[in-house]
Amino acid sequence: MAFFKTGDTHGMVEKRGAGLWLTHVVMILGVLVIFFPIWLAFVASTVTQPEIVRPPMPLWPGDQFLENYSKALFSGVNVPVTTMLFNSLVMAIGIAVGKIVISLLSAFAIVYFRFPGKILFFWMIFLTLMLPVEVRIVPTYEVVAGFGMLNSYGGLIMPLIASATATFLFRQFFLTIPDELAEAARVDGASPMQFFWDIVVPMSRTNVAALFVILFIYGWNQYLWPLLITTDPEMNTIVMGIRQMFPSGDDVAEWPVIMATSILAMIPPVIVVVSMQRLFIRGLVDSEK
Amino acid sequence: MEKRVTFRGWLLPMLLIAPQVVISAVFFFYPAGQAIWQSLFIPDPFGLSSQYVGLGNFEYLLGDRFYRASFVTTAVFSILVTLCSMIPALFLAVMADRLIKGSGVYRTMLIWPYAVAPAIAGVLWLFMFNTRVGVVSWYLGTLGYDWNHVLNGGEAMGLVVVASSWGRISYNFLFFFAALQAVPRSVIEAAAIDGARFWRRFWTIVLPLLSPTTFFLLVVNVVYAFFETFGVIHTITSGGPQQSTTILVYKVFSDGFVGQDLGSSSAQSVILLFVVGVLTIVQFKFVEKRVHY
């Protein structure tokens, strides 16, 4: 995407010398300020509880890294963090894959077929764009409870798939696929599904990947929904599980373990975003269009 | 828009579209319908029967001091979040755009907070400002400022605003940076030749050219502040003290799940449904405009 290309076309108006250095200094300061909360969490995850409870806590990492992280990963506060990480992974991948699959199929149907009720279905899907799960939590909770899906992966995943962003994205993209391809496929006697598998899906690869990045982070970072429907600690996801680690009442929170868990909770999405930066930005721009 | 070439048959497309339609019907339309239906009733305290009250729940809500206060809180909160996340992002993007080398490195660093869940961001900021162990609150204390967001509503609001804006700076930065890179260099060079200094060029040329992106981000950030900040508020303040950080979405949750007042919670959902509808329409309008710049 040319829109996002950084760099080479800069002309004569860029600062050089002192001004350039000043700009770098400002940027570095900006990055440091933005990073400070993460740095502090990391430091807190490598020191002992007494070091934190008697403020001010140190600003440089201590030597308790292994202790705190192994405690978090393998025993945790209510449930080992490995369990929560696994649940989050299942949920995030389930949402990303589920949404991509149903959207690919329905967008294909909407674009490449004429069938009775098409307009009705189209608007039905369109309407789901409008209402975030936060707004309809009480009745959605009742539906999921009615199906006996509390504390299950299905209950975690399904209600969050019911949204049309991805369908629209694929619809827009399919409309740009040249008609000649479908025509050729039809002349050659290929069935619609052959056309779908051999032409449409391979052509959508980049869109699928970009969307996967966005949906993975969306799913991983869910908070309210898992909070409501996972009463069993074994089903907690890591993002909502952290809040459960804070003691109720006057007990002092186990900060090093909580902060180690926070760091562990942000590692997978950070890796996804940073390593797939180009796809991520593309997905961001696409899904907001 | 329609394809010129389509395939024949109606059974196959029905099957293809079925999963999405079924999931939308079960987990979207039915619950949304339920919300609208329940908003017309008041259940008795034992949940055995409910009484039809028409628009009574809405009348009650609009007359309710706490609900109106929650509207004001939401407005203040979303304006502050939008400003606190867009202004630093624009500033950083302008700085990064001035660099010939290294802007990619800064961009990679600045993306990080976007990946951090709002609820985790809440925990991080809570840790920094915790009244007992927080580093920032401790240093504020040595300066003679007694920070206590548990008791002080203004400080609580400040903290949830900053924690909510933090991850959003990344998002806004990416969009502003991309828009800045797309500003034609020839326009800027022409202004430079005419003797316009950097900040003058920024105010008179660059900022007006950024306005489509800015409008778009305004809407998107308001939507974010309304609907996606639940995690921040729940982890830091739980809506307190004295409901000073109870935004509308939080109130749907606390009245519905904590207070078990289903009629009122449903009516609030319906009101929010209208708010989302309006915001979506505004968003589409602006996005359409954005295409023609």
Image (cartoon, coloured by chain):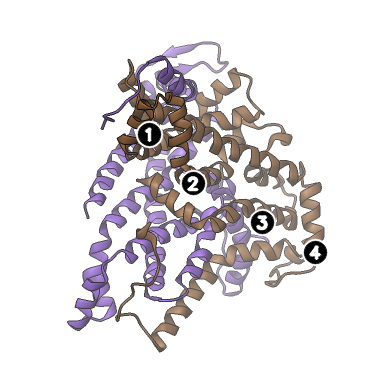
**In which quarter of the view is residue B288 placed?**
top left
Which amino acid type corresponds to the residue marked 4 in the rendered image?
Gln
Residue ID for mark 3: A263
Mark positioned earlier in the residue sequence (4 or 1): 4
Q: Nearer the viewer, mark 4 or mark 2?
A: 4
- Colour used to depict chain A in the structure image: brown
In the picture provided, is A39 more to the left or to the right than B181?
A: right
Q: Which chain is purple?
A: B
Residue ID for mark 1: A130
User: Residue B65: where, in percent of width, then height?
Assistant: 39, 37
* Secondary structure type for disc 2: loop
Residue ID for mark 4: A64
* Secondary structure type for disc 4: loop
Q: Depth check: give the residue in front, B133 or B269.
A: B269
Please state, as top left, top right, bottom left or bottom right, where the C terminus of chain A lies in the image: top left
Q: Depth check: give the residue in front, B151 or A278.
A: A278
Respond whether the residues carrying marks 4 and 2 are from the same subunit. no
